[in-house]
Image (cartoon, helix red, strand yellow):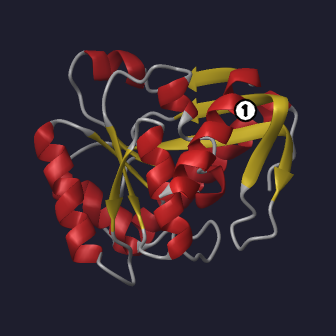
Amino acid sequence: MIAGWLVAVALRLLYLTLRVRLVDHGELFARRRRGEQVLAAFWHDGIALLPLVVTRLGWPGTVNVMLSWHRDAEIAAQAMRHLGIRAVRGSATRGWLGGLRGLLAARTRGDDIAVVPDGPRGPRHQAKDGVVQLARSTGLPLVVVGAAAWPAHRLGSWDRLQVPRPFARVALVLSAPVALPADKAAARAALEAALAEANAEAARAVGAHPA
């Protein structure tokens, strides 16, 4: 799909101008180099910043991210592939079982997994049960990624997607593993709290207001 390729080219050019700062609380880069796999969660509004972990910071592994089946996600999936991230298709409302199988296959291959707890349609910044189920199914420690850019443009979409302006400052905050309580609702709340903290830290690092 040519739209996905064009998005990837535009993002690569934009990424070259950005000033990127990494805060790695969990020493995840070092742990990945030792062969430990990662299950990471990030909010949907940071999806344009996620590829920086691969393209600019040189993540030492192969990342698989689950995206839904609607048309916009197909363009995003193609763009992700051109940026060095594998896309697994599925969502809480369509194709979740197939998506879960794809992520479990990635786990078996030794790849890393990234998931969007509030995707594909929200509500914004509210985690769904699937991420907790995935953490328990894979046995991987769950970490969160906070992402912020300034100056940046916020789209009018449900997620208020942030798109950094050229030469913007970007902060990516990687947490230590998040402890998930046995209770499902408590586990979701713990995940949401960890994401809120990581994104607030990223916003402070670039002088942006958390949104």
Q: Position of residue 94 (x, y in %)?
A: 35, 82
Q: Nearer the viewer, residue 24 or 164?
A: 164
Badge 1 marks a residue whose secondary structure is helix
Q: Position of residue 196 (x, y in %)?
A: 64, 52
Q: Is residue 122 above or below residue 19?
A: below
**Which residue corresponds to the image point at 80% horizontal and 56% vertical from the top-left?**
211
**Which residue corresponds to the image point at 82% horizontal and 57% vertical from the top-left?**
154
Q: Residue furthest bottom?
A: 93
Does residue 20 appear left or right of residue 131 in this picture?
Answer: right
- Indicate the quadrant where residue 43 lies: bottom right
Does residue 81 appear left or right of residue 112 in this picture?
Answer: right
Q: Is residue 48 above or below residue 83?
A: below
**Which residue corresponds to the image point at 43% horizontal and 70% vertical from the top-left?**
68
Q: Position of residue 190 (x, y in %)?
A: 49, 58
Q: Position of residue 97 (x, y in %)?
A: 21, 75
Residue to which mark 1 is pinned: 14
- Indicate the quadrant where residue 92 lies: bottom left
Residue 110 appears in the rendering: yes
**Which residue corresponds to the image point at 44% horizontal and 33% vertical from the top-left?**
176
